Structures are given as C-alpha cells and as structure tokens.
Image: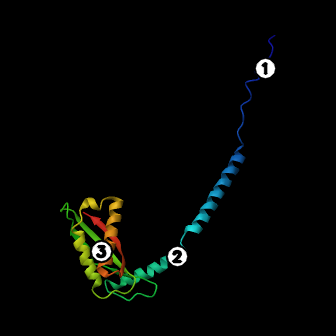
Amino acid sequence: MAAPSNPPADAAVPKKGPSLVVQGGVLLMLTLLAAGMGWFAGGRLGPSTPPAQAALAAGDAHGEAEGAHGEEHAAAPGHPTIIPLAPINTNLAAPDDVWVRMDLSLEFREAPEPGLADSIHQDILAFIRTVKLHQVEGASGFMHLRADLDERAKIRSGGKASRVLIRTLLFE
C-alpha cells in the first residue's frame, strides 16, 4: 500500500488577502476622508458670498444693461455700469477673406459721459481691422486679444472703463 503523500512544507497553503468587508470599510473611510478634505478646501478657497447671491447681483446689473439697449444709465453705488455695444462685423488684416463678428459690452466703474462708449467702439473696430488671424489663434491668442481690447478701452476712456466683456466672437 502506498503511503499517503504529505505536501512538502515549502508549499504552504495560499495566503488569503484581507476580507472584502475590511477592504470595503477602508474604501469607505478613504472616500469620506477625501470628501471631507474637498469640502474643507472648497470652504476655505471659495467665494465669500454664496453663489445664489452673486448670481442675483450679476443678473441685476446685466438686466439693467440689457434693458437699456445701448442707453447709458447711472450706476448704483457698488454696481458697475455695463453698456452693450453694437456688433462689430469686419474683415481681418490677413487673410483678408476671413471675417469676424464680435458682440461686446463695456464695464464702467462709474457712469460714463455720453458718447464715450461710441468712441471706444470705433477704436476697437479700427484695431480689429489690423489684427491677423494667426495672432488670435488658440487660447493664448484669445487671452492676448482680450488684454489688448481692455487696454485700448482703458486708454480711450481715461481709465473709466474697467474691462471689455466679449459676449460673442465668431470667425468666418
């Protein structure tokens, strides 16, 4: 009769990993820790006003400007005046068969004098006609264009225009 074979001592029983309950508990604990850290960081770095109040304040200022249809109104204390400009439709300097359409608005810290928005509009139109397509390609080109428009508006207004808001930019 053959003797029963015993497994060698080197071939141990395969080790079991941690149980599924322990793995699930660790995963849940890490998930809660990450969510808590995200909530804490968001509270420390987020806006000081609740988003609903900020949206209402921005909506009020935008609503006044939209209702004006180009008319200039006095700004309420603490609120900027936003004046929509007429759309700009023109061709670029190079290539000359590419057309651009821009819908812009101007943001003033205080109420501007009559005609200032129109002179800024004409200055921006003259500037856009000198722009070449390769200058405004990509995200960095857009950022440079926005910075150039802001600078021209500030120079033309003597610092009264705080920025140019680009609502629509279309190349055809």
Residue position marked by numbered label 3 in the rendering: 152
Which mark, by number, is residue 19? none
Residue at left offset 35%, top offset 72%? 167
Within 10 Å of disc 3 (Cα), the crowding (few <14, some 14-19, many 20+) is many
Image location (x, y in percent) of residue 73: 36, 88
Amino acid beneath label 3: Arg
Query: How is colour applied across the structure in the image?
Result: rainbow
Spatial CA distance of label 1 from label 2 is: 74 Å
- Between disc 3 and disc 1, the foreground one is 3
Image location (x, y in percent) of residue 147: 34, 69
Q: Is residue 140 positioned above or below 81 on the image?
A: above
Residue at left offset 40%, top offset 80%? 62
Residue position marked by numbered label 2 in the rendering: 52
Amino acid beneath label 1: Asn
Which residue is more in the foreground, 64 or 47? 47
Q: Is residue 59 positioned above or below 94 on the image?
A: below
Q: Quadrant of residue 143?
A: bottom left
Residue position marked by numbered label 1 in the rendering: 6
Which residue is more in the foreground, 45 or 4? 45
Within 10 Å of disc 2 (Cα), the crowding (few <14, some 14-19, many 20+) is few
Mark 1 or 2, nearer chain start: 1
Which residue is more in the foreground, 55 or 148? 148
Q: Quadrant of the C terminus?
A: bottom left
